Amino acid sequence: MNYEAVIGLEVHVQIRTRTKVFSRVAAGYGQPPNTLTDPVVLALPGTLPVMNKAALDAVIKAGLLLGCEIAPVCKWDRKNYFYPDSPKNYQISQYDQPICAGGSVEIELPGPARNVMGEHQRIPLTRIHLEEDVGKLNHFAADSLVDYNRAGTPLMEIVSEPALHSAEEAFAYLTSLRATMVYGGISDCDMEKGQLRCDANISIRPVGETKLGTKVELKNLNSISFVRDGIAHEIKRQLAVLERGGTLVQETRDYDGQTGTSQSLRSKEMAHDYRYFPDPDLMPVKVDETWKARLRGECPELPFDKQRRFADRYQLPYTLTSVLVWDRELADYFEATVQLTGREKAQAVANWIVNYFLRECGEKRLTAAALGVVITPAHAAELIQLVDSGQILSNAVATVSAGMFSTHEKPQAIAAREGLAGRTDAGELEQWCRDAIAANAKALAEFLAGKDSAINAFKGPVMKAAKGRADPKQVDATLRRLLAGQQTGR
């Protein structure tokens, strides 16, 4: 029997705000345990929550970016459970009136080749709601300690419909969703810091069946790659159970991304009884058109929309747009440079950024934001114009750009200091070629015997003598002319 997987994702995104969602204490990461707390976070008697409007703004903005319907009125509910990570023994959340409903996440599946655009789909969302994060349990050999620094941080839960059907689709979904949140300035989405967390609900069913199969929830998926790997592992596990005549049970499983294995954490009934009821300390919130219009004006162009525009406006190939658009600051850097060079130079700008600048950034562990400081768009434009005008050759760009990263100087100054400015004259180039041929009798003999690749043995010494001022095409042509003379004279 053929089966298909059905996957739904529950993604928690920590919202980037200065303070927590219902108190004035700072929100943050990496502080000493239990220092980002106050009486509200610790649920001391007599304390009352006060809504952080910046957190509401972020959720509404996320909803607008994802095409959700924004509720005109939303309310707050208490989700009751007893666990050490919640000092109140309940979590303030939203139950039957979430702030965002519907919407979708655009994804791109891998194309037939890595340098070709893949198929685009929209994965529907069920809802987005706002809640408070809980504390973090730290487990040791003999005991467990709780750190409440995270408790009370504004947390957005984004729930997809069960509309994903493979591990690769889930990977594409999370990649796109994360980029949307970062682009919108809603969250940094650093999974190592717990700013983006994902639980996956996975079931399989016979192809053609509409009823969902037995659901298994995967927990502790702490990287997007582990989400993909964990889902692939769970689909294989469920298929293996059915193929040997077993029965799947609804449960929660823990996936270990290091070993690629999972284990059962607990069996799970159809639903937990959290005894939701409206929070009596928080008033419902009305979201009017003025509020939405203000936030809609702050919404940025999203990566896929930007990619389509770059391809149309600048005639950039997919190999370049697929690198540029996923970092908003890198895309902005590209367009700022193009404004200085002119649109006709857009592909040259993109090529230098992707093939030279990003390589240097990777080696020096610099972000795209740092790139704009180290090499300003004005300096990048000057470099491209120097190459275009022939004042420096394209094979010298790596040397000049590396110098720009090291010294922050203008490219003209680096080219002059390194002797890279200006072209080599024909007479000088011919002499270097003659010297290279004379110095390598073995390569000469091989070339004259018909081994064309032997010409490469002469090119290195010529380029070294030219110090980046020789055009590789002219070097090749000059060498071939001189070598042809040698053949004629045999």
Image: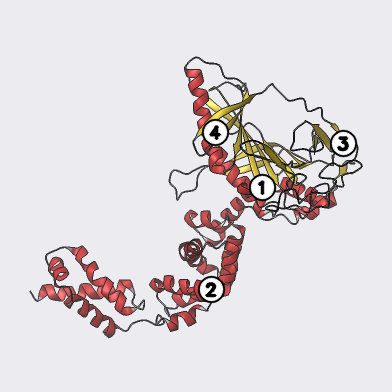
Identity, as a three-letter code, of the amino acid under mark 2:
Ala
Q: Which residue is tagged 3?
A: 279
Question: Hey, which quadrant is residue 129 in on the image?
Answer: top right
Q: In the image shown, does 113 or 158 lie closer to the viewer?
A: 158
Label 2: which secondary element: helix
Q: CA distance from mark 2 to mark 3?
A: 57 Å
- Mark 2 packing: few (<14 Cα in 10 Å), some, or many (20+)? many
Q: CA distance from mark 3 to mark 4?
A: 36 Å
The relative height of residue 180 versus residue 344 in the rendered view (above or below) is above
Disc 2: which residue: 381
Mark number, residue 419: none
Give percent across and percent down for residue 325.
Answer: 57, 56
Dot 2 or dot 1: first in sequence order is: 1
Q: Quadrant of residue 331?
A: bottom right
The earlier-in-sequence mark between 2 and 3 is 3
Percent across and percent down for residue 304 are 59, 51
Residue 424 visible here: yes
Amino acid on which disc 3 is placed: Asp
Mark in front: 4 vs 1: 1
Of the residues under marks 4 and 1, which one precedes in the sequence? 1
- For the residues marked 3 and 1, what is the alpha-carbon distance in whole angstroms? 26 Å
Q: Which residue is mark 4?
A: 231
Of the residues under marks 2 and 4, which one precedes in the sequence? 4
- Tell me the mark number nearer the camera, choosing from 2 and 4: 4
Q: In the rendered structure, are the residues bearing label 3 and label 4 in contact, judged by CB atoms less than 8 Å apart? A: no
For the C terminus, the quadrant is bottom left
Residue at mark 1: 195
Give SS at disc 1. loop
The answer to the question of whether label 2 and label 1 lie on touching residues, with beta carbons closer than 8 A, is no
Mark 2 vs mark 3: in front: 3
Residue in the picture at 11% in, 74% down: 488
**Pointer 4 with pointer 1, Cβ within 8 A:** no
